Image (spheres, rainbow, N blue to C red):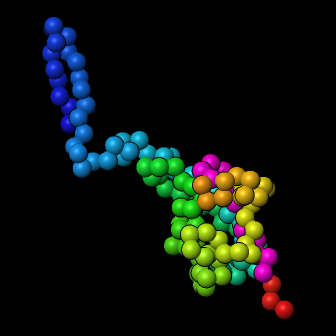
Amino acid sequence: MVAMVTAHGLNTYFRFTHPSFPACAEKMAAPVALHLEFGGGAELLFDGVKEHHVTLPSQPEPWDMKQLLVWIQRNLLKERPELFVQGDSVRPGILVLINDADWELKGELDYQLQDQDNIVFISTLHGG
């Protein structure tokens, strides 16, 4: 909604937003293209597919690892989610690398994803 106010012969425009329309919706975070890799047996939970090139859609706030894990569960994970996630994080025994660095050095779940990031999930749990 736009209103025009005239003050001393000058036109001044003010932008009004309906209260039910979130202010953050005016500026959306861009889509994020990622390369996801699953190894060490974790790929078996994803129909045996080790590499996935995905594009996360635009959303009001930037994507972070916590949101990525939810997206992976809803869109890629094919079976036995309890072997990949625990609560809102990865299960203990899943090593996570962000651009070849341990995710603990990047902020773990709070890391904000960047376009073209390479995220690797490696299971260190092996049956015997």
The location of residue 117, given as percent across then percent down, is 68, 52
Residue 30 in sight here: yes
The location of residue 103, given as percent across then percent down, is 72, 58
Give the residue at the far right of this rendering. 128
| Residue sitting at x 22%, y 18% | 12
**Membership of 119 in magenta stretch:** yes
Residue 35 in sight here: no
Give the residue at the far top of this rendering. 8
Q: Which residues are magenta?
A: 111-125
Relative to residue 31, is residue 7 depicted above or below? Answer: above
Relative to residue 34, is residue 123 depicted above or below? Answer: below
- When asked about the image quadrant of residue 15, the answer is top left
Left or right: residue 28 versus residue 49 is left
- When asked about the image quadrant of residue 4, the answer is top left
| Residue sitting at x 22%, y 43% | 18
Between 63 and 47, the one nearer to me in the picture: 63
